[in-house]
Image (spheres, helix red, strand yellow):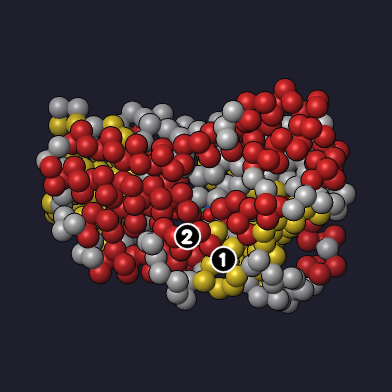
Amino acid sequence: MKRFDYDVVVIGGGPAGLVTSMYIAEKGFSVAVLERDKEIGVPVLCGEGVSKKIDELGIIPRGRWIVSEVVGARIFSPNGTMVKLSAERAGGETGYIIDREEFDKELARLSAKRGADIFLRCNARQGIFEDGKLVGVKADLDGEEVKFFAKIFVGADGIESRVGKWIGIDTRLKPKDIVSCFEYTLSGIECDKDYSDFYVGKSIAPGGYIWVFPKGDDVANVGIGILGSYSRPGLAKELLDRFIESKENLRKGKAIRVLTGAVPVARPVESFRDNVVLVGDAARHTDPLTGGGIMHALIGGKAAGESIAESLEENDISLLKRYEERWKEILEKKLKRNYMMKEIASGFDDKTFDKLAESVKNINFEEFSTYGLIKALVLKHPSLLIKLKPLLGLR
Ligand SMILES: Cc1cc2nc3c(=O)[nH]c(=O)nc-3n(C[C@H](O)[C@H](O)[C@H](O)COP(=O)(O)OP(=O)(O)OC[C@H]3O[C@@H](n4cnc5c(N)ncnc54)[C@H](O)[C@@H]3O)c2cc1C
């Protein structure tokens, strides 16, 4: 059986795995990325919305992957009340509408340029253990069984995360912590190319929302995410079709792409154990409120890559704990607060969404924070204090 030896083996060639490998290769260590699909970035499983704050990370330069830019987001409650937010205040999923295939491919190019090896059609199937420690991975490479050996392994294998399971990390997801998605790219529609639109409400998208992300003035990604605990087979498509049919500007659209997928909206799991690190969706770093995970995959990937390189430089595996310190410093508070907000909001009925939208629709969100929003809601609706109180502590 063919054998490959590397300093690090990364399982999964999505944004998290590619960025992790980029920072390891940059320091001159050998790193292999194993991707089971035949092409990086394909199939696309994404609404393709991302915050412009991605530029500040300094990981991927602006390029062809940016399809359009919006100035903000509009949130519509079930009775049509609109709340407008500037792009900065709208969370992680608005600012740029991207070409996700091109985005992932650009990350792959950046990583390969620094020296990472990318293995396509390479399905990691099983861990190889010695004295309870992960030392290798059995994989199918182009139909041939091969083995990869390394000092450190990275599980960047998305929502399914087999790597976490191999080492005993509980990555199981409860239905209430998964969002099922269905999305069309609709052509021949009319949409406002300056805004990403979100439609909320229990009757519209239980536990989630419908998004319309413009890729121009006549093309948009129109998708829905609904919480697993409210879902049944076919429901996401049914609700999205009903929504599109009800909208004059979308009804005439022709689908040029259809996709389905799932997003973890859970609490983060243990992000490293011994010589194994989990990043991105595998570590449950997706924003539990919005389902957006691209930015967090990049932040986690950089933190993991830098910490792994330092650990190899010092020949000290205990330095992997720096990965946890780094991602927690940036993401922990937000993930905690947004998980609580998701738990609370998923119980709201349509009337509550209408009431909330009505209360905040005239607030200038340019000068507003999530903390300020929660405070304003509690002042207007003291009955929400008990539910929202824990969030006030997470400023
Ligand atoms: C429908 C939908 C819409 C979304 N919209 C947005 C959005 O608009 N904005 C946003 O920020 N986020 C969005 N997300 C979330 C975002 O796509 C993810 O958070 C992001 O892709 C996470 O990156 P990742 O690298 O952790 O995982 P992934 O991108 O899932 O990459 C994991 C990779 O691992 C590979 N893999 C898995 N198992 C193995 C194995 N055993 N061997 C080899 N390879 C393996 C997979 O093929 C895959 O390429 C959306 C998700 C879905 C499903």
Task: Give residue 194's quadrant in the image.
Answer: bottom right
Give the structural element (helix, strand or loop) at label 2.
helix
Task: Give residue 307's quadrant in the image.
Answer: top left
Q: Position of residue 360 (x, y in %)?
A: 79, 45
In the displayed structure, does residue 301 sit left or right of residue 128? right
Q: Position of residue 150 (x, y in %)?
A: 17, 46
In the displayed structure, does residue 368 sit left or right of residue 317? right
Q: Position of residue 113 (x, y in %)?
A: 25, 69
Residue contact at pointers 1 and 2, CB within 8 angstroms: yes
Of residues 362 and 332, the one drawn nearer to the viewer in this rendering: 362
Q: Which residue is mark 1?
A: 96
Q: Position of residue 215 (x, y in %)?
A: 63, 72
Q: Residues within 10 Å of mark 1 (few under 14, many from 20)?
A: many
Which residue is located at x 81 percent, y 69 percent?
249
Q: Earlier in the sequence, mark 1 or mark 2?
A: 2
Say which mark, if any, is on residue 11.
none
Of residues 166 and 339, the one drawn nearer to the viewer in this rendering: 339
Of residues 125 and 203, the one drawn nearer to the viewer in this rendering: 203
Q: Which residue is mark 2?
A: 54
